[in-house]
Amino acid sequence: MRRTLVLPALITAGLLLSACADTYSTRQHVLSGGGIGTGLSSRTALYDGCVSCGVGVGTGVGAGTVYLVD
């Protein structure tokens, strides 16, 4: 059941993030980092347990890391 929801969720997130194309570069990079972190952590969290916890942490780490680097 969980696996069938991952692909539509990632497609929806991609479509929502594509609306943020007309922003300055730091904001674009942070959104991209958050999206990548969300995608990677949701797949990992599916096999380990708490999906919402994994997605929240992955998004925060991805966006935070890109913000610090950029």
Image: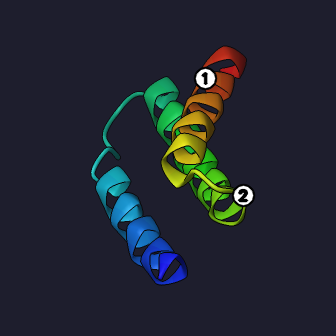
Which quadrant of the structure image shows residue 32?
A: top right
Q: What residue is rendered at 53% in x and 31% in y?
A: 30
User: Residue at position x 34%, y 33% from top?
Assistant: 23
Q: For the residues carrying marks 1 and 2, which lies nearer the camera in this image?
A: 2
Query: Which quarter of the rendering shows the C terminus?
Result: top right
Element at label 1: helix
Total marks shown come to: 2
List x then y, in percent, for residue 16.
30, 55
Give above or below for 9 relative to 37.
below
> Where residue 7 sits in the image (x, y, percent)?
48, 77
Looking at the picture, the colour scheme in use is: rainbow
In 3D space, how far apart are the residues under numbered discs 1 and 2 (Cα atoms)? Answer: 23 Å
Q: Which x, y percent locates residue 14?
A: 41, 62
Which amino acid, mark 1? Gly
Query: Up-down: is 47 above or below 1?
Result: above
Q: Are marks 1 and 2 in contact (CB under 8 Å)?
A: no
Could you tell me the amino acid type at mark 2? Asp
Give the farthest residue toward the top.
Answer: 68
**Label 2 packing within 10 angstroms: few (<14), some (14-19), many (20+):** few
Q: Residues within 10 Å of mark 1 (few under 14, many from 20)?
A: some
Task: Where is residue 25? Give x, y as percent.
Answer: 49, 30
Which residue ends up furthest to the front in the rendered image? 49
The residue that appears at 51% across and 25% down in the rendered structure is: 26
Q: Which element is circle 2 on?
A: helix
Query: Residue at point 49% right, 72% down?
Result: 6
Residue 6, compared with residue 68, is above or below; it is below
Q: Which residue is mark 1?
A: 64
Q: Which residue is mark 2?
A: 48
N-terminal label among 1 and 2: 2
